[in-house]
Amino acid sequence: MRTKHRKKNKINIVTLGCSKNLYDSEVLMGQLKANQKEVVHEEEGNIVVINTCGFIENAKEESINTILDFVERKEEGEVDKVFVTGCLSERYKPDLEKEIPNVDQYFGTRELPLVLKALGADYKKELVGERLSTTPQHFAYLKIAEGCDRPCSFCAIPLMRGGHKSTPIEDLVTEAQKLAAKGVKELLLIAQDLTYYGLDLYKKRALADLLKELVKVEGIQWIRLHYLFPTGFPEDVLDLIREEPKICNYIDIPLQHIADPVLKSMRRGTTKERTDKLLRLMREKVPGIAIRTTLIVGYPGETEEDFEVLKEWVKEMRFERLGVFTYSHEENTHAYNLEDDVPAEIKQERANEVMAIQQKISAAHNQAMVGQKYRTLIDRKEGDFFIGRTEFDSPDVDNEVLVEADYLPIGEFVEVEITGAEDYDLFAVVVE
C-alpha cells in the first residue's frame, strides 16, 4: 500500500564498494544539487540510485542483494524508482536487465550524463571539482585517474572501468582548492593505479608533478597516497615524501603475492627480487615510512611451497599495514582460464595464517610507539575516547589512536603522547 504524504522526488544515493565508488557518488550528488534536486546519501528517499561494486564474489553478492532489497521496497510502494549504476552494472548489464527487470534503468561506470538525464537533471561541465562530500568534513578522497591499463590476470577492473585516463593536473588543483575552502585538511589520492598517472596526458609519469602543485594548496595539511602499482614505480615520488612535510610518510602499494611462479601467472610484470629491491629503496629514501600492502592467497596453482615463501616474506618485511583477500575466480579475466584448484577452506586458512603473522607484527610496531609523541588528526568521538589517526594511518582501514580528553575539536590536529598499545589500536593523552 503506497503511503500518503511521503516526500516526493528525494534522491537517495546508496554506495557500495571502494573509495573510488564513494568519490563517484559524491560527484553525482554534486551535479544533482546543482540541478536543484534534493539528494541524500544512504538515507530515506523515494528515488534510489545504487552505485554497485562488481570486484569480487562477496562484493557482487552484496550489490545484488541491495538491488533486490530496493526492488522489493519498490514493489511494496515504499520507493517509486530504482536506478543501478557502477561496476556491477557495467560488467553484467544484459544479465541484470534479464534477471532483475523491475529496476527502472541500468547504467555503466562512465554514463554520468545519462544517469542525470534519467533523474531529470543536466550534466554541468562547469562543475569541475564540485562534489557533495559524504566523508567527515576534514578529509576527502581525490580521484586522480580512472580505469587501468595493467594486464593482471585476476582483475576485472579494466572490464568495468575501461583503460587508464588521467585527470589533468590543473583540474585536480582546482578540486583540491574547493575542498580546502570547505575545510578539508587531508587529501587521500586514489585511482586504480597512481603509478601510471600522467602517462596518457603528459607522456611521462607525472605523479611527482601533481604532488608539487597540490602541496601549494592552502589549507591542505596532509596528502596520502593510495594504490601505487609496483611495476614502473615513480621513484622521484619518494624524494618528495621525504622532503615535503604535507605528504604523509605512508604508501599503499598492493603487491598481491611474492612467489615468482605466482607473480608470473598473475601477470604482475615483476619478480620477488625486484619487489624486495623497491621496498628496500622506499625504506632507505623515507626512513620511518609506513607501507600498506594487500595480498591474495589461494590463487590458481598456488602451492604449499609458494604459500610458505609468502609467509616467510611477510615475517621478513614486517609491513606496517597489511590486508589479505582470498582469490575470487572472476569470469572474463585471464585467470578464469586456469583451474580454481585451491579449495575455499584452504584459501581461508591461508588468509587466517597470514593475518595471524601480521597481527603480531602490528602489535610490535605499535608497542614501539609507546612513549613517543605524534601529530594526530581527530576524526570523531566514540564513547569516552576521541578517535584520531597519525600520518601512518588511513581512515577506515588502518590503526586508530584513542585519546582520553574532556574535549578535542573534531577535524583538528593535536599533539599526543602514546601511553599504550594493542594489536591495531593505540592509546594516548594530549601533550599539554
Image: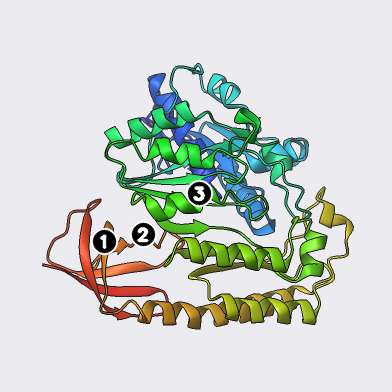
Q: Quadrant of the C terminus?
A: bottom left
Q: Does the CB distance between marks 2 and 1 fall below 8 Å? A: yes
Disc count in the image? 3
- The residue nearer to you, when weighing 234 against 183, is 234
Residue at screen point 79% across, 54% down = 153
Q: CA distance from mark 2 to mark 1?
A: 8 Å
Residue 130 in sight in this render:
no
Residue at screen point 46% across, 27% down = 171
Tell me: 136 left or right of 153.
left
Q: Earlier in the sequence, mark 1 or mark 3?
A: 3
> Label 3: which residue?
237
Residue at screen point 69% across, 57% down = 57
Q: CA distance from mark 1 to mark 3?
A: 23 Å
Neighbour class for label 2 at 10 Å: few (<14), some, many (≥20)?
many
Compared to 200, does 259 lie above or below? below
Query: Identity of the amino acid at label 3?
Result: Val
- The residue nearer to you, when weighing 189 against 3, is 189
Query: Identity of the amino acid at label 2?
Result: Glu
Residue at screen point 53% across, 62% down = 282
Compared to 4, does 383 lie above or below? below
Q: CA distance from mark 3 to mark 2?
A: 17 Å
